[in-house]
Image (cartoon, grey):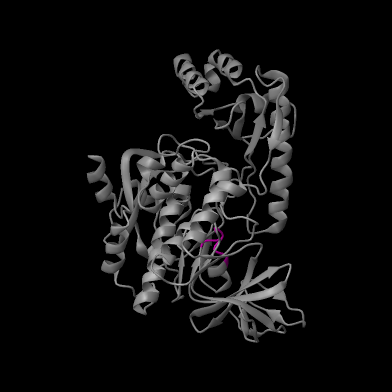
Amino acid sequence: MERRQLLKYMTLGAAGVGMAGLVFQKGTAVASPLNMPVVGTYDVLVCGGGTAGFPAAVSAARQGVRVGVIERYGFMGGVPATSIMPSWHHLNKRGSGFLIEFAERVSALGVGPDPLDNRHIEPEVVKYLFHEISMEEGVHIHLHEMIVGVIKAGNRVTHVITESKAGRRAYGAKIFIDATGDADVAYHAGAGVMKGDAEDDTLQGMSLRFRIGYIDIPKYLDWLKGYPQYCRGRKADHIEKLKQRYLKGLDIHMGTDMSNIWDSDPDPELPRNTYFVWASIRPNELSINSTRIYNVDGTDPDDLTKAELTTRKQAWAIWRYCKKHIPGFERSIIVETPCHVGVRETRRIRGDYVITHEDYRNARAFEDSVMFDNVTFDSHDSKKYDTFSRRGAVVDIPYRCFLPKGLDDMLVAGRCLSSDHLANSAIRGMWNSFQGGQVAGTSAGLSIKYGTTPRDISFSKLLDTLKKNNLVTSGDMHMKKSGQ
């Protein structure tokens, strides 16, 4: 693509000093001292190639518009890839639309668990298929680029600015989708954001998932039968069923609680106030969710550094304990830690509507609903861990939650959706992010086709298109479909 030079005004998301000594303040346009090359111009530019960005890019491209996606890592995939998270938690029951189509592609590939039949997807399959499907749909992929700012004209973002091995560069678009997880683009553009619990600024804790290999899993499960206090009330016959499933070559999953062990052990590197949840999707391996750190902010590089160092130490401490004390782990080793600590919550946009935990608890319906969610919280707060659930209840997610106030050419998707702290603990799930990505991408593509903004798009056109693409757009539709 032909490159041209751009000298514009930049709006950066936080105070900082430019190369020429100029001070950049949030929301203040200051002349840039740099001539930046524009290396891509699109109808729709998706920022972030994870579980929200990938479906957003594909859904926009399927509307016949030119789409690009920017991803900071060397692969698309988001949390399933960067945090090696295999658990999609019954997506065949919760999911619809492109999410089920993706699951069918995973199933057809035949590598790892079949997500149509259980709750897991092999992380390497996510990396592979996110790239393959995106390229099939003509999406232009830009890897190894971190978004560090924007260029604005009035209430419109005209370009995002990236840093890479090539230095600072700019990408232009008519409509942007912020699927960064941290609302980086919306924040840099001056949108209002929320962070943490309104009462005490508490953010959900971070965890580093890791894999231990060379385990004698049947031996471990037999040992576990004798310790119901670690099994959250599950009896020996339940564990035996898991063992038989494992012996058939199928995936297994179990939430156990080893807190009493960690709390009583003198090793200071063992985590506190946590659990020991695991999945087995590969022979002789457990993918473990147990490390934990609280009171850190995923938008602060110093806090992220602390989280990485702390949780990696915890992972090795957990392995040392298991190897020494738990039957089945005698020959085990850590075979993988991810490239990034798992961040559950940072910035959330202040959208045209903020969905609340009261909306969830009351299973509220909305006239502008574009998807639904189960009424289940999983807050991972250090002092008030909330796992409230209304069995069988669902809540609508209004389209207004995708629209940052004050910006006319942008949508968000994923965990930075407009929500309060506790509602965010529900809406951040990968299956929700994926379906929200389909909503945002479809809206962006239709907005280009009809020459409008996402805020002014015909809602009936959007709804009709989502339904034609098999997305269940409201809790009412879900209840009828499931016969509840």
Camera-nearest residue between 420 and 47: 47
Residue at 54 percent across and 45 percent down: it is 125
Given residues 339 and 198, the one toward you in this image is 339
Residue 138: horizontal and vertical position, in percent?
A: 49, 65
Question: Which x, y percent locates residue 224?
Answer: 56, 17
Q: Is residue 473 visible?
A: yes
Residue depicted at 71% across the width and 83% down the height? 34
Q: Is residue 265 visible?
A: no
Residue at horizontal 54%, vertical 47%? 126
Can you give x and y, in whole percent of width and height, for residue 408 in the image? Answer: 43, 76
Confirm whether the magenta stretch covers residue 433: no
36 relative to 240 in the view: left or right: right
Vertically, is 300 above or below 308? below
Q: Quadrant of the C terminus?
A: top left
- What is the quadrant of the N terminus in the image? bottom right
* Residue 379 position (above or below residue 397): above
Residue 182 counted in the magenta span:
yes
Q: Nearer the viewer, residue 208 or 66?
A: 66
Q: Residue at x 32, y 57 (%)?
A: 469
| Number of numbered discs overlaid on the protein picture | 0
**Residue 413 as seen in the image, left or right of residue 460:** right
Quadrant of residue 399 within the rendered picture: bottom left
Q: Position of residue 420 (x, y in %)?
A: 45, 56
Reply above or below: 54 against 220. below
Q: Quadrant of residue 400?
A: bottom left
Q: Which residues are magenta?
A: 179-184
| Vertical arrangement, residue 146 with respect to residue 316, above or below | below
Q: Residue furthest top?
A: 226
Q: Which residue is nearer to you in this view: 49 or 225?
A: 49
Q: Characterize the magenta stretch by its predominant secondary structure.
A: loop
